Image (tube, grey):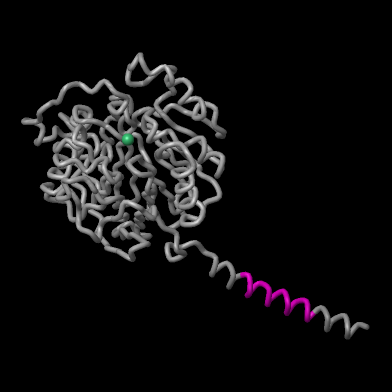
Amino acid sequence: MRFLFSCSKAAVLLSSAAILVLLAAVSLKAAPSPADGKKLSIYWVDVEGGAATLIVTPAGESVLIDTGMPGVRNPGRIHRVAREVAGLGKIDHLIVTHMHLDHFGGAAEVAQLIPIGHVHDNGIPDQDPDGNANNRSFPLTIKPYREMKAERRSILRPGDELLERKAPPGMPKVSLRCVAAKQKFAPPKAGAARSKPNPGCDNVEAKPVDTSDNANSIALVLEFGSFQFFVGGDMTWNVEAGLVCPLDRVGQVDVFQVNHHGLDVSNNPILVRTLAPTVAVMSNGISKGCGPESFKTLKSTPSIKAIYQIHKNLRRDSENNTLAEHIANPAEQCAANHIELSVSADSKSYTVSIPATKHSASYASQ
Ligand SMILES: [Zn+2]
């Protein structure tokens, strides 16, 4: 018995040692590192001339910016990209940049398809946000958005930071900061060169005042180490100038989501040139957006190496289109192809792809 006991004791000691070795091996393998495949991803969903941009951080925190139009089609497309492409079970944050139907319209239906955590917007108006007294149906139009299921709701203000999860160990920090809302701007970031007067502001021309809710759009800057992305909803000309003149409150970015689907009441050259992006992505429709002036500005901005469009512009002014390989949906009967961007774990480079056409191109972060 004694022998057996000591033998089994030795066996226990041996097996404990083996377990420790095994645990050490497992913990070594499980140690989080950038090589684990964690990355920052951005998806532009085709919502036919609306906007729906999905961001997933390396910590798995997800942000949907705008939701396209109401109905089955757009919310269904957003849901498919969120679940099947990004692998999400929940959208942590929804940001509605302004109260136009092509931005808030799909929200209530998206919320029925996938749980939504925190909803951020400019505040829900009781009447038409463009001041159109004849639009008596607005209270009914906004009702599903007002009543949609969400865990929390907040009004976003310039300077607010949205993300809550910490970056995985060894990876750069991610922040998503509101830089403009309701025509008010966040102060330039402390200590940044951005707080200097912008030398390009001397000859900026104003356009007639925009009294629509487009001017009130929320604008955001996503920052992940060296990588920066600007998204400004349907912000219009004079407000765009105000954001970067006389002080540049944003600074240089890598990727610019072309404002307002590429319409010419937006995309003031002073904004585009100050942001100095390498890549521009346009959420346009077959006949909406992709305006000649906006296109001219994008093409003549020296920093821009590639312009991507969610749709081919099928109007008569077909010269206002980017390279065929940079268009996600070239035909009228579209397949709802999305554009995808993935930033490397060290944030120093990023790849823009159109998975359906197998297009893929990489760019260095600035
Ligand atoms: Zn819009």
Whether residue 47 appears in magenta in the rendering, the answer is no
Q: Position of residue 2 (x, y in %)?
A: 91, 82
In this view of the protein, can residue 254 be seen by the observer?
no
Question: Which residue does the image show at 6% across and 31% down from the upper left?
Answer: 203
Q: Is residue 340 above or below residue 358?
A: above
Question: Which residue does the image show at 46% across and 25% down from the upper left?
Answer: 142
Q: Position of residue 226 (x, y in %)?
A: 29, 52
Q: Nearer the viewer, residue 22 or 289?
A: 289
Q: Position of residue 20 (x, y in %)?
A: 65, 72
Question: Which residue does the image show at 31% across and 51% down from the upper left?
Answer: 332
Question: Which residue does the image show at 41% across and 48% down from the upper left?
Answer: 55
Give left or right: position of 287 versus 53: left
Q: Is residue 237 above or below residue 50?
A: above
Q: Residue furthest top?
A: 133
Q: Is residue 131 above or below residue 217?
A: above
Ligand 1 resides in the quarter of the picture at top left
Q: Nearer the viewer, residue 110 or 191?
A: 110
* Span highlighted in magenta in the image: 10-23
Would you identify the image quadrant in which residue 207 lies? Answer: top left
Q: Is residue 228 above or below residue 26?
A: above
In this view of the protein, can residue 332 be seen by the observer?
yes
Whether residue 22 appears in magenta in the rendering, the answer is yes
Where the N terminus falls, by quadrant? bottom right
